[in-house]
Amino acid sequence: MSQKIYNVLVLCTGNSARSIMAEALINTMGGGRFHAYSAGSFPTGKVNPFAVEQVANLGYPVAKLRSKSWDEFARPDAPHMDFVITVCDKAAGEVCPVWPGHPISAHWGFEDPAAVEGSDEVKRRAFTRIFRHIMSRVRVFVSLPIDKLDKLAIKDEMDDIGQLPDKEA
């Protein structure tokens, strides 16, 4: 009997940094139980090079990364999503996309490291910090006993993960 593989869509506005890093982390840390994708409501069309750096450090194949519209996942031939996670920062006034349908959804807000100004080293530190925050939440998510929980319990767990304090992984 094969184990179900859960599809996860990580949404943000620009799909250049946070959602890209979350996609790679879920795919890497998920132990084959998850297939993560990312998209944006208004994609920038390019992946931030500092996000690429973080993902490359995981050993994740960066050639797979691209900034894309969520429209790709709304087509009839798109994979069915089991989970949709938004990662934009509502506190900063960003408008988070809303996904229609019935996947289990949650909001895990993170500051946008792409908005940090300064030297490359300042930007790199911001990306490293946010990457670690995303990693700590992904670690909890991928360890959930999804196959043993009902949909409401999973939703509660997902919401709780979004409330976890930002800390280093």
Image: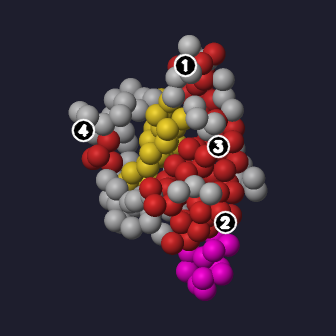
Structural crowding at the residue carrying mark 3, measured as other residues with C-alpha within 10 Å and reported as few (<14), some (14–19) or many (≥20): some
The percent coordinates of residue 81 (x first, y second) are: 41, 32
Q: Amino acid at mark 4?
A: Arg
Q: Nearer the viewer, residue 88 or 7?
A: 7
The residue tagged with tag 1: helix, strand or loop? Answer: loop
Asked if 100 appears above or below 59 in the picture, the reply is above
Residue drawn 28% across the image and 39% down it: 74
Q: Earlier in the sequence, mark 1 or mark 3?
A: 1
Q: Horizontally, is 164 left or right of 107 in the view?
A: right
Whether residue 91 is visible to the viewer of this picture, yes or no, is: no
Structural crowding at the residue carrying mark 2, measured as other residues with C-alpha within 10 Å and reported as few (<14), some (14–19) or many (≥20): some
Q: Tell me the residue that label 2 is attached to.
A: 128
Colour setting: secondary structure
Whether residue 2 is visible to the viewer of this picture, yes or no, is: yes
The residue tagged with tag 3: helix, strand or loop? Answer: helix
The percent coordinates of residue 131 (x first, y second) are: 64, 59
Q: Amino acid at mark 2?
A: Thr
Q: Earlier in the sequence, mark 4 or mark 1?
A: 1
What secondary structure do most residues of the magenta stretch adopt?
A: helix
Q: Tell me the residue that label 1 is attached to.
A: 2
Distance from label 4 to label 2 (Cα)?
34 Å
Structural crowding at the residue carrying mark 4, measured as other residues with C-alpha within 10 Å and reported as few (<14), some (14–19) or many (≥20): few
Distance from label 4 to label 1 (Cα)?
27 Å
Asked if the residue at tag 1 contacts the one at tag 4, i.e. Cβ–Cβ closer than 8 Å, the answer is no
Distance from label 2 to label 3 (Cα)?
17 Å
Q: Amino acid at mark 1?
A: Ser
Q: Earlier in the sequence, mark 1 or mark 2?
A: 1
Q: Earlier in the sequence, mark 4 or mark 2?
A: 4
* Quadrant of the frame with the N terminus: top right
Q: Tell me the residue that label 3 is attached to.
A: 29
Distance from label 4 to label 3 (Cα)?
28 Å
